[in-house]
Amino acid sequence: MTKALYPGSFDPVTYGHLDVMQRAQKLFPHLTVAVVENPRKAPLFGTAQRKALVEQALEEMGIERVPVITYSGLLIECAKGLGVTAVVRGMRAMSDFDYEFQMALTNRDLDSGVESVFLMTAGKYSFLSSSIVKEVKQYNGQVHKFVPRCVERALEEKFGLA
Ligand code: PNS
């Protein structure tokens, strides 16, 4: 059975990510979520907290049997180490396409045995991003439609709103 990896920064995880996880798990029962240790942008949350929030969010959503790991370095090395042959990425709008196209073809060039698979998020989350959630919460706006309660609480603590 094909093993799949859903990698990302998850800074923090949103309902958009969780929607992709649920869709991916239907296709790939052996799905692992991988939280990158050093995202390109300086993260708001440290690696351990981003991982813990994904785990708590999965639990809150009742999504079972999805292990969460962290990785540093190349994604393709992480995938190979786990014996994974499919990398899942969420696609929201055309604005995601250029980066995802570049990343997928780079990863294929690094290892042609790992295929990238793109899943469209639900329309209601198509505008959603971790950055938007952080910006809204930073100014004490409502984010309960965008993230699970555990993430909202972590954001409130981070921004001194708790
Ligand atoms: O949630 P993000 O930030 O869009 O996820 C991007 C991520 C973490 C999947 C990607 O940046 C990554 O895998 N980085 C690790 C380094 C790597 O493998 N780079 C080559 C792929 S272009």
Image: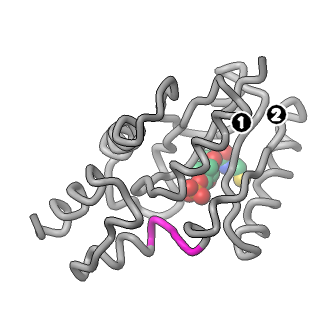
For the image shown, how many numbered marks are present on the structure?
A: 2
Which range is magenta? 127-131
Q: Nearer the viewer, residue 78 or 24?
A: 24
Q: Position of residue 38 (x, y in %)?
A: 48, 49
Residue for badge 2: 114
For the residues bearing labels 2 and 1, Cβ distance under 8 angstroms:
yes
Residue depicted at x 39% and y 70%? 133
**Is residue 98 shown left or right of residue 125?**
right
129 lies above or below 118: below
55 lies above or below 116: above
Q: Is mark 1 within 8 Å of ligand 1?
A: yes
Q: Which comes sooner in the sequence, label 2 or label 1?
A: 1
Q: Nearer the viewer, mark 2 or mark 1?
A: 2
The amino acid sitting under disc 1 is Ile
The amino acid sitting under disc 2 is Val
Q: Nearer the viewer, residue 111 or 122?
A: 122
Residue depicted at x 82% and y 60%? 101
**Is residue 34 shown left or right of residue 110?**
left
Q: Position of residue 91 (x, y in %)?
A: 70, 61
Q: Quadrant of the C terminus?
A: bottom left
Q: Residues within 10 Å of mark 2 (few under 14, many from 20)?
A: many
Residue 3 picture quarter: top right
Disc 2 element? loop
How far is disc 2 from disc 1 in space, using C-alphas? 8 Å
Residue depicted at x 58% and y 41%? 22
Is 140 magenta? The answer is no
Disc 1 element? helix
75 lies above or below 159: above
- For residue 76, the mark is 1
Residue 84 picture quarter: top right
Q: Main secondary structure of the magenta part?
A: loop
